[in-house]
Image (cartoon, rainbow, N blue to C red):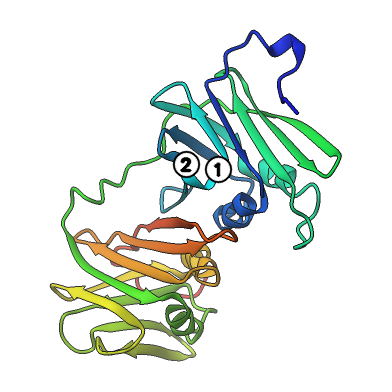
Amino acid sequence: RNLMTSQEENIEVVFFCKIENARILSSVLNLLQLGKKENAFVSVTRKGIRFTVEDSKCLQGSVHFPEKIFQEFNTKEDQVQFKIPLHIMMECLNIFGTSSQSLPSLQIYYTGLDSVCLMLQEDDVVTDVGLKTIEMLQPPQSFNFQRTSIINTVIMMSDSLKEAFDELDWSLPIVTILLSPDHPYFRLSTNGPSGSCQVELPKSSEAFETFNCTQTQSNNYRLKTLQPCIKALNHAHKTQLRMNQNGLLNFSHMIKTEDGQTCFVEFFIVCVEDEEPQTD
């Protein structure tokens, strides 16, 4: 079925894509939901689609869906950008339910006007949705991660990193993350009135696929801000952790989709500078 109505046939579509299993998108996009009614910046290039969300300039999350996961993918321009309410898009994607038996197909088209059109189809049931775009006053924040020298990089098995975070005292607001070329190499720690907790891993641990640290770094991060990053570990196979000289932390999760393709979900987290751990 063609998504365009007869009245719309003369409107040029600047972007169109089709995927046979909409759940591939919805399951990964769910990792960008931060517990708020966030809006997503959408950037389309000939290489794929990137969705980006932000929270108070201290957290940025994004996922890139490569062009090859779609059965059809066509953009008339080198870059197409728009902004949409992510929580409403997720409601649309899950309109047929979230069970493994539900496998609706999805078409998306955008004319460059004030709405993005979605069509979901399961068997003979078709749902058309016009998702109103939001005025994009400014693009997502650029952390310029590559411009500031990356000091420490490790690639870890995601389940091992999840186990390490699970050991912490999550009732406390701050976690200290240490990466170092010397002992203790990798350490997560929380400290509060009820006591302290530390999790250390030697660089020889099977948790690490690669360990490339050039100098000792120890920075504080809000555990509440890290929660989406930790949630994504449940769905990832491997995770790259990087720190730059400003203490900016980057999680890059490698996630396998249901059809065996690879997507990367990234988070950037700003460190809490010179803040003592304290209870809220």
- Name the residue tied to disc 1: 70
How far apart marks 1 and 2 lie (CA) works out to 6 Å
Q: What residue type is labelled 1?
A: Phe
- Name the residue tied to disc 2: 67
Disc number for residue 143: none
* Label 2 element class: helix
Counting from the top left corner in percent of width and height, residue 251 is at 38, 63
Answer with the quarter of the image where residue 11 lies: top right
* Residue nearest the observer in this picture, 50 or 147: 50
Image quarter (top left, top right, bottom left or bottom right) of the N terminus? top right
How many neighbours does mark 1 have within 10 angstroms: few (below 14), some (14-19), or many (20 or more)? some
Counting from the top left corner in percent of width and height, residue 243 is at 26, 64
Counting from the top left corner in percent of width and height, residue 30 is at 61, 55
Taking the view exactly as shown, the residue that stands out farthest to the right is: 124
The structure residue drawn at horizontal position 46% and vertical position 80%, both measured from the top left corner, is 165
* Residue nearest the observer in this picture, 104 or 242: 104
Task: Say whether residue 135 is visible.
Answer: yes
Q: In this view, does 208 lie above or below 195?
A: above
Counting from the top left corner in percent of width and height, residue 186 is at 28, 82
Answer with the quarter of the image where residue 72 lies: top right
Give the mark count.
2
Task: Say whether residue 277 is visible.
Answer: no
* Label 1 element class: loop
Q: What residue type is labelled 2?
A: Glu
Answer with the quarter of the image where residue 83 lies: top right
How many neighbours does mark 2 have within 10 angstroms: few (below 14), some (14-19), or many (20 or more)? some
Left or right: residue 136 compared with residue 175: right
The structure residue drawn at horizontal position 51% and vertical position 63%, both measured from the top left corner, is 256
* Residue nearest the observer in this picture, 268 or 190: 268
Left or right: residue 50 compared with residue 20: left
Q: Are marks 1 and 2 in contact (CB under 8 Å)?
A: yes
Left or right: residue 196 compared with residue 144: right
